[in-house]
Amino acid sequence: MSKSDKPILRALHGESSRRPPFWLMRQAGRYLPEYRALRQKAGGFLDLCYAPELAAEVTLQPIRRFGMDAAILFADILLVPQAMGQKLWFAEGEGPRLEPIRTRVEAESLNLDGMAGRLAPVYQAASLVAAALPEKTALIGFAGAPWTVATYMVEGGSSRDYANVKEWAFGDPAGFGVLIDRLVEATAAHLSAQLDAGAEVVQIFDTWASAVGPEHFDRLVIEPTRRIVERVRRNHNDALVIGFPRGIGELYPRYFAETGVDGIGIDAGMAPSLAARNLQPHGTVQGNLDPRVLVAGGEAMEKAVAAILAALSNGPFIFNLGHGVVPETPVDHVVRLTELLRTA
Ligand code: CP3
């Protein structure tokens, strides 16, 4: 079978289908008992990311249970700054922590040379998964977009107001540009390496794109992403790329047209009918069930899924959530979701 017989790849090439393919952001993770067991065995989250056999196993767990049309490689967007030399750790129950970088000199000291070696276990995991997947299931690699990764690098973890990163980005555009440039280079290399290892699609997560604002959007969101897509396609001219600039509202069409991505992930805040009208004419749409509707299940979920399918399955479409699966999600609700999608 040729690669492009996989439903996700066909959708990204612009084909529509009455029963659209699906996968779920964060489909591997704490809502699955088998994930929790393996994570405990590995020690910590980062230990899991750097153990190729275990990371491959965790990637495959949701595929075995639910049969999604794509697997997403188990890793994290913050492995890239770590591979460039920034200290990263996950404090139990607190999320990610990094030793903050806030000056041009610190940005200049980020080191791209050792990156490929440090991330080799991630690429090994990708090869293991690629060899083990069912023949119609695609492998998706990913990275964080420069802006989103920079928020963690500068704030030292998750942030409520992005005070430090905005002060730097708005007050010293040239200095902050050094950080963005390093991230463009590192991210393009990381995505290319995942494609070399067997990934067939890459997704760029710009989870905090909505914090930027229209005035700085070109410089901080569109341009860095466009440059990454261009660089990735220098090595892989047929690379399929999905952008996920979460929460950008009316800037979605411009992001889609100007970055060159093949597919666009929309968050749960966008009406599916609006996405059908404004985005599908330009390419493939992916989304956008609210992860909390998946937690609620029942009639709320049945109705929301029906509305999304009615609006979007006439054009190129990949069903997904509007953001990642949350740990409280009942496994039974994911089972029901897969039934709804298979009988659509
Ligand atoms: O299944 C998949 O989608 C693949 C794996 C994946 C993870 N993180 C695993 C993970 C992916 C694609 C990511 C992306 C990621 N990581 C993003 C962008 C997407 C998004 O969700 O907004 C961001 C912002 C991060 C950074 C990050 N990693 C945070 C903020 C956290 C803590 C929050 C949390 O859920 O605990 C992580 C940890 C993380 N990444 C976990 C997993 C499964 C939980 C770790 C654990 O305790 O086991």
Image (cartoon, rainbow, N blue to C red):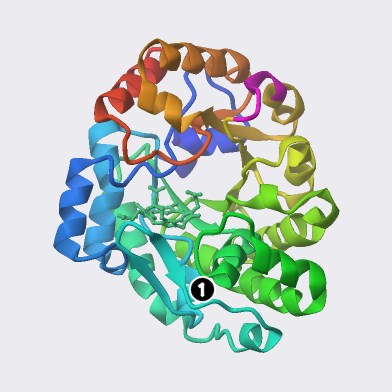
Residue 128 coordinates in the image, percent (x, y): 29, 59
The reply to whether residue 79 is in sight is: no
The reply to whether residue 46 is in sight is: yes
Q: Is residue 132 left or right of residue 232?
A: left
Question: Quadrant location of the N terminus?
Answer: top left
Membership of 112 in magenta stretch? no
Residue 192 coordinates in the image, percent (x, y): 54, 65
Which amino acid type is shown beneath numbered disc 1? Answer: Pro
Residue 152 coordinates in the image, percent (x, y): 55, 65
Q: Is residue 40 left or right of residue 181?
A: left
Residue shown at 47% from the left, 73% from the top: 98
The residue pinned by badge 1 equals 81
- The one nearer the camera, 310 or 108, is 108
- The one nearer the camera, 251 or 92, is 92
Q: Is residue 10 above or below residue 90?
A: above
Membership of 272 in magenta stretch? yes
Question: Quadrant location of the C terminus?
Answer: top left
The total of numbered circles placed on residues is 1
- The one nearer the camera, 229 or 204, is 204
**What element does badge 1 sit on?**
helix
Residue 19 coordinates in the image, percent (x, y): 47, 19
Q: Is residue 316 above or below residue 175?
A: above
Highlighted range, magenta: 269-274
- The one nearer the camera, 334 or 8, is 334
Ligand 1 near label 1 (Cβ, under 8 Å)?
Answer: no
Where on the picture, by quarter, is residue 119? bottom left
